[in-house]
Image: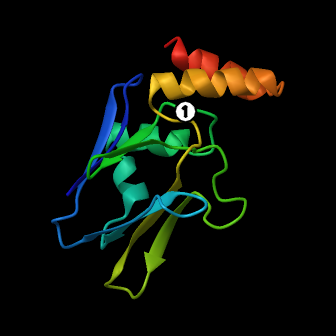
Amino acid sequence: MIILIYNAKLKVEIIFDTKADWIQFTPKHYEEIPHITIEMKEFDFHWHSLSCNDCKQFIDSLGSDSLNWIIGYDNNVYRLDLKNFGIGNYPRNQLTSTHLSEYNSGTRLTLRFSDIPIDKNKMIRLLKEAEKVEDYEKACKLRDLINE
């Protein structure tokens, strides 16, 4: 299975192939707080990002309010919520180095999904609901995403 993390606005994409024995992927889109975990054995994602512009842009966006990052896998597509990085309740967005031993280290990436859908019609419905309950911050985000 291919996992694609991308930002169309920045023209950036990161591809993980779970057929590689060093990638372990755990989707949890069915949980109360939907999220995924990608574990990369013997691969330092942060160090890699120093020489890979796409990965660097992704790491730089962690903790930002950007809703332009999307993840797709196994016919599922979700918007990522990168706003709260390293804080909040489990599961929290994290990029963690896993140092099991001197020879067996890696990276664990945990990413939460946004409650804002990809589908434009669903976003329009959410916009109307947000306006109705006077949640103007969410309404503005939805409006901006709809108009992109």
Residue lying at the far right of the rendered structure: 134
Query: Could one spot residue 79 in this view of the protein?
Result: yes
Q: Nearer the viewer, residue 55 or 68?
A: 68
Q: Nearer the viewer, residue 11 or 71?
A: 71
Kind of residue at disc 1: Leu
State the SS at label 1: loop
Is disc 1 surrounded by few (<14), some (14 to 19) or many (20+) residues within 10 Å?
Answer: some
What residue is pinned by disc 1?
Answer: 67
Q: Quadrant of residue 46?
A: bottom left
Q: Residue at x 60, y 25 (%)?
A: 125
Residue lying at the far top of the rendered structure: 147
Q: Quadrant of the N terminus?
A: bottom left
User: What color scheme is it?
Assistant: rainbow
x, y percentage for residue 114? 57, 43
Q: Quadrant of residue 105?
A: bottom left
x, y percentage for residue 83? 64, 43
x, y percentage for residue 41? 31, 73
Q: Nearer the viewer, residue 109 or 117?
A: 117
Q: How many marks?
A: 1
Residue lying at the far left of the rendered structure: 19
Query: Could one spot residue 136 in this view of the protein?
Result: no
Q: Is residue 32 left or right of residue 137?
A: left
Q: Is residue 91 left or right of residue 140?
A: left
Q: Residue at x 38, y 58 (%)?
A: 45
Q: Residue at x 55, y 33 (%)?
A: 67
Q: Is residue 32 left or right of residue 107?
A: right
Q: Would you place residue 141 above or below residue 58 in this image?
A: above
Residue lying at the far bottom of the rendered structure: 101
Q: Residue at x 40, y 25 (%)?
A: 10
Q: Would you place residue 17 above or below residue 118 in this image?
A: below
x, y percentage for residue 37? 44, 64
